[in-house]
Amino acid sequence: MSNRTIKILKPFVFLLALVPFFGIVWSFHEDTLGADPVQTITHWTGDWALWMLLISLAITPVRRLSPKLAWLVRLRRMLGLFAFFYASLHLLTYVLLFSGFDLPGALDALRQGQFHVLREDWIAVWPTMVEDVAKRRFIQVGLLSYVILLALALTSPQWIMRKMGGKPWQTLHRTVYIAAVFGVIHYWWLVKKGVLSPWKDSAVLLVLLLARPAYQWLKKKPAVRVAA
């Protein structure tokens, strides 16, 4: 695929990746988020964070299927950053809506320039959040996944890669697989016992984790010569 085509394709993929975000905004505007809007937003953002992460991880094994698919690599960073974007929204949903933080009051204080109210509200809710994180293991593993994604997002620019050096940068960015594993574990520990909805994401991740060693094995395997 030519560079010109990819330049045209990138904005399209960018807008396509924003569709879930606009979808949740529209649902909020139309008041169609269901009986528990906060839970709907939480699940929506969490699902799309994981799906974007899995899609970005799938690019490497898919493009190895054919040299003609090499152009997919140029979309990987964008999709990875969208995974971080939705993960950030997922975390913000917890911080601003689940933790007991007075969001309407904070917005009013912000409009009136009463920044001390924001600080006081945050100080009031912080101990509750720390206690919640300490006793809920699904939040702990979710935060670990987010910290990895944060590190990868901060080091994604080309100039940082050049400054770090290729090998250290690659080593760091391979931890994306750990973030994905933690993300799936977060999902399993979040749902109620007996709920099997995370199995599809788990299966996709397992395939992606096995694809890398399988490719290395096939590459090292000597070609079989057919006798004339």
Image: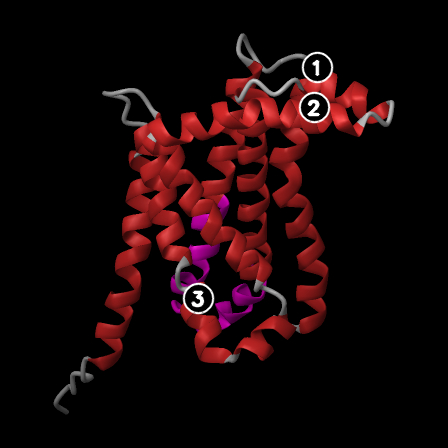
Residue furthest bottom as drawn = 228
Task: Please rate how many residues cluster around mark 1, counting C-alpha atoms within 10 Å: few if below 14, some from 14 to 19, many from 20.
Answer: few
**Number of marks in the rendered image:** 3
Mark before the other along the chain sequence, 3 or 1 = 1
**Residue 120, how many percent across, how many down?**
68, 24
Question: Which image quarter: residue 198?
Answer: top left
User: Which residue lies under the disc numbered 3?
Assistant: 172
Q: In the depicted view, which residue is nearer to us: 42 or 52?
A: 42
Relative horizontal placement of residue 123, taking residue 130 as reference (left or right): right
Q: Residue at x 36, y 36 (%)?
A: 186
User: Which residue lies under the disc numbered 1?
Assistant: 30
Q: Secondary structure at mark 1?
A: loop
Relative horizontal placement of residue 168, taking residue 219 as reference (left or right): right
Colour scheme employed for the rendering of this structure: secondary structure
Task: Give the Cα distance between marks 3 and 1.
Answer: 42 Å
Which range is magenta? 52-75
- Any magenta on residue 103? no
Q: Secondary structure at mark 3?
A: helix
Residues at discs 1 and 2 in contact (Cβ within 8 Å): yes
Q: In the depicted view, which residue is nearer to us: 22 or 65?
A: 22
User: Which residue lies under the disc numbered 2?
Assistant: 26
Task: Check the picture and name the quadrant holding the C terminus.
Answer: bottom left
Q: Secondary structure at mark 2?
A: helix
Residue furthest left as drawn = 227
Select label 3 or label 1 by which is in front: 3
**Residue 12, how many percent across, how many down?**
69, 51
**Residue 122, how many percent across, how many down?**
63, 27
Mark before the other along the chain sequence, 3 or 2 = 2
Q: Residue at x 45, y 71 (%)?
A: 170
The amino acid pointed to by label 1 is: Glu
